[in-house]
Amino acid sequence: MGWKAAEKLIPKWKILRGDNVMIIRGKDKGETGAIKRVIRSQNRVIVEGQNLVKKHIKQGQGHEGGIFTVEAPLHVSNVQVLDPVSGRPCKIGYRFMDDGTKVRISRGRDASGEIIPRPEILKMRRKPRPVECGPKDTPLEVVLEKTYDARTGIGMPDL
C-alpha cells in the first residue's frame, strides 16, 4: 500500500463485526445482512450473503478446483447500520450514559436516537484461550509464591 492509500484509512471505525447493515450503493442496493468480517487495512467489510461473485479456483493438492460463489468485500462507505427501532439505515453517534458508559446511538434525519447495542458475536473469542497448562507454562504455585516483602525488604537483590 502506498502512502496516499495509507492516508485515507479510517482512523476510528463505527461499524463493527456482527452489525446489521443495509447496502446503499452497488448491485445489491437495498439488501440487508450482518457484517461477517471487517478489513480495516482496505476500508472494506464483507456482508453475509451479499455481493456474491464467481471465483475460479485451480485444483491443487488437498482441494478440488472449480467455480465457486464467494462474498466479495464492499467499501465501508457503501453500507450503513440499521436503526434498531425503525429498521432504516442511519448514521452512528456516541453518547455517555449517566453511569459513564459509552454507547452508540442512531443519528440522522429519520433516526430514532435509540441505543445501537454492541453485537453479541464480539463477546466470543475467535481463538479460544488454552485451558490446560503447556510444557512451557509456569506452574500456578510458583506464580503465587511471595518472593518480596516491601515492609521488611526481604527478597531485595543485592546490587
Image (spheres, grey):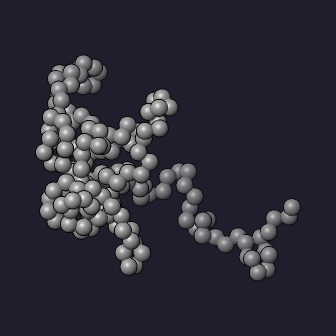
Looking at the image, which is closer to me, 10 or 19? 10
Residue at the spot x=42%, y=75% of the render? 100
Q: How many marks?
A: 0
Q: Is residue 119 visible?
A: no
| Name of the residue lying farthest toward the right | 159
Against 18, is 44 above or below? Answer: above
Q: Quadrant of the C terminus?
A: bottom right
Against 151, is 15 above or below? Answer: above
Where is residue 141? Give x, y as percent: 58, 68
Displayed quadrant of residue 137:
bottom right
Residue at the spot x=27%, y=25% of the render? 62
Where is residue 64? Give x, y as percent: 21, 23
Looking at the image, which is closer to me, 127 or 19? 19
Where is residue 155? Give x, y as percent: 77, 70
Does residue 122 appear to the left or right of 138 in the view shown? left
Q: Quadrant of the N terminus?
A: top left
| Name of the residue lying farthest toward the front | 109
Q: Is residue 15 visible?
A: yes
Does residue 148 appear to the left or right of 25 in the view shown? right
Against 11, is 148 above or below? Answer: below
Where is residue 36? Give x, y as percent: 26, 46
Residue at the spot x=27%, y=61% of the render? 107
Looking at the image, which is closer to me, 79 or 47? 79
